[in-house]
Amino acid sequence: MKEINELKFRVFLVDAKNNTYASDKKGLDRNLEDGSKELVYENGIYRYKDRYFGRTSFHGQEIAFINDKPVWSMCYFGRSNYKDPAELFNFLKFALRHVTEEKPFRGPFEIEDGNFRYVNTNTGALWNFSGVEKIFHKNNGSGDGIYRLDYFGGSII
């Protein structure tokens, strides 16, 4: 593939993430025959797919395409032990809507809202990265938190 306009690609990734899972719109995901859910976002020459299995324990992959050629991917595995998954995942979506163009993988480094605190640590850059995100609840004394997601990815060209 010829040169990629990295700035435009970063802007697209942020836009795609804000218009799929992190969105507060209902019914964006579609159920596939294999039991997975898939979210798709397109804008011009760019297309993004997020496909995952599970709910409170889940695994997925995001793939970004330029002109129908896969160029970037991220795999993730997450799990939660929180008593109210809907409340937890609503907060997670809030955190993920704060994704940055600098690190367009998951959410910001840290954000709080109400009783929840989101922390995201990662290494690398757009084309080769890995990280861990955790969510903590003020009323849960566990240092491990109530949610954890491990992720990694980068260039596939």
Image (cartoon, rainbow, N blue to C red):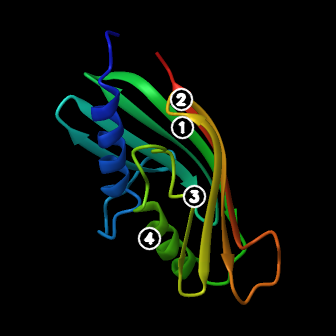
**Marks 3 and 4, how far apart at CA:** 13 Å
Q: Quadrant of residue 130?
A: top right
In the rendered structure, which disc, 1 or 2, sits on the residue that comes first in sequence? Answer: 1
In the rendered structure, which disc, 3 or 4, sits on the residue that comes first in sequence? Answer: 4
In the rendered structure, which disc, 3 or 1, sits on the residue that comes first in sequence? Answer: 1
Total labels: the figure holds 4
In the rendered structure, which disc, 3 or 2, sits on the residue that comes first in sequence? Answer: 3
In the rendered structure, which disc, 2 or 4, sits on the residue that comes first in sequence? Answer: 4
When the figure is inspected, residue 32 is found, relative to residue 29, above or below; the finding is: above
Which residue shows up at 42% across the image and 51% down it? 100
Circles 2, 4 touching at the beta carbon (< 8 Å)? no
Q: Residues within 10 Å of mark 4 (few under 14, many from 20)?
A: many
Residue topped by disc 4 = 94
**Marks 2 and 4, how far apart at CA:** 24 Å
**Marks 1 and 2, how far apart at CA:** 6 Å
In the rendered structure, which disc, 1 or 4, sits on the residue that comes first in sequence? Answer: 1
Closer to viewer: mark 1 or mark 2: 2
Circles 1, 2 touching at the beta carbon (< 8 Å)? yes
Closer to viewer: mark 1 or mark 4: 4
Residue topped by disc 2 = 154
User: SS for tag 3?
Assistant: loop
**Marks 1 and 4, how far apart at CA:** 20 Å
Residue type marked 1: Met
Q: Residues within 10 Å of mark 1 (few under 14, many from 20)?
A: many
**Marks 3 and 2, how far apart at CA:** 19 Å
When the figure is inspected, residue 5 is found, relative to residue 130, above or below; the finding is: above
Residue topped by disc 3 = 109
**Marks 3 and 1, how far apart at CA:** 18 Å
Q: Position of residue 89 (x, y in %)?
A: 52, 72
Relative to 45, is 31 on the left or the right? right
Closer to viewer: mark 3 or mark 2: 3
Relative to 112, is 49 on the left or the right? left
